[in-house]
Image (cartoon, rainbow, N blue to C red):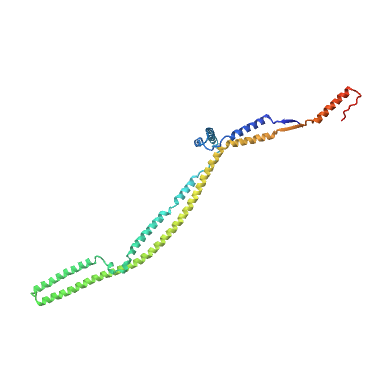
Amino acid sequence: MAVQTTRTLPAQFIEDLGKDLAKQVTAQSGVPVVATGLAGITQQPGETQDDFEARQQAAREFTTRQQSLSGLAPTVAGQDALQQQAQNLATQGVGSFAPFLQQAQAAGTAAGTALGGVGLGATAFQQDVQDFMSPYQSQVIDATLAEFDRNRAIQEQGIRDQQAALGALGSGRAGVQLAEFGTGAARERALLQAGLLQQGFGQAAAARQQDIANRGALAAQQQGLGAFQAGLGTQQQQATGTDISRLGSLGALNQAQQQATLDAQREAARQAAFLPQEQLDRFAGQVTGIMGGYPAQFQSTITPNPTPLQTALGVGTTLAGIYGATRPGAKSTFSF
């Protein structure tokens, strides 16, 4: 069978563009994708020298493209001065309550310690009033009695002097006078000592009663201090919860800012890394559009080859024609 094919080709420049596109696609497929500079490229174990040099070259080209695209690289606006000032003020406010609570708690603890120290004397309720008497009472009594004795001696000497002046010294009446004076003086001395002891006892009893009253007031104050400290604990918990919430909000804002910066850096690296592929894709799209406007045409014409019978019949017909032409009037024995 004979096959005849007629091919209509596009314009030569379109064919050249297609060949160039195919070469570029083939060449680009062998270039490694690198998204770091030359400083970040190190030869890996098992990597051939050719592959390592290819990655180094790709890194150089990446740095060049990154520099060329710096004007198009995405960026993230930083915090302005007002935002930074607000964040600093918010951060400074965190934990600012702590010193005041600590001071109040320390004052409450000191007061409680002082109250506890007074409370340690609770056994005094069961002790004698003697514990409340002045430790200097005996000295006061001794000094007072000594002064009383001195005055009594002076008075007794005065009586003796009078008796001597009257010439009655040593008489019975003089002895009675002196004995009577001594008895009265002893009685007065005893009354003086008893009065001093009674005075000391009264003061001790009053001090004991005041101590009882003071202990009751201190107990009430101690209860109030306990409630105050409990309130401080509640305020501290509330303030701590507020600080945690505030710090969490600030941390979320900072994290979002940092993530946006990282995303911008990643996008800039992606642009520089895949710029050749994107340019090749645009070029391929343009070439495809041009080739679509000049489609290639393929036409095929098929002529069947003659069979052996058809060839024999054709030969016979030809021979019959020749024979008839050479012998006029002869009847041909070939008929079809």
Asked whether, in this view, residue 92 is left or right of residue 303, the answer is: left
- Residue 283 picture location, percent across and down: 62, 35
Q: State whether residue 198 is above or below residue 89.
A: below
**Disc count in the image?**
0
- Residue 127 picture location, percent across and down: 30, 68
Q: Quadrant of residue 288?
A: top right
Asked whether, in this view, residue 16 is left or right of residue 133, the answer is: right
Q: Quadrant of residue 112?
A: bottom left
**Viewer-side residue, 12 vs 146:** 12
**Viewer-side residue, 293 vs 106:** 293
Q: State whether residue 322 is above or below residue 48.
A: above
Q: Residue at x 44, y 50 (%)?
A: 92
Q: Residue furthest top?
A: 326
Q: Residue furthest left?
A: 167
- Residue 190 picture location, percent across and down: 20, 72
**Viewer-side residue, 44 vs 334:** 334
Asked whether, in this view, residue 168 is left or right of residue 240, the answer is: left
**Viewer-side residue, 8 vs 303:** 303
Q: Residue at x 67, y 29 (%)?
A: 12
Q: Residue at x 72, y 31 (%)?
A: 7
Q: Quadrant of the C terminus?
A: top right
Q: State whether residue 315 is above or below residue 75.
A: above
Q: Residue at x 87, y 24 (%)?
A: 323
Q: Quadrant of the N terminus?
A: top right
- Residue 168 picture location, percent across and down: 9, 75
Q: Residue furthest right?
A: 329
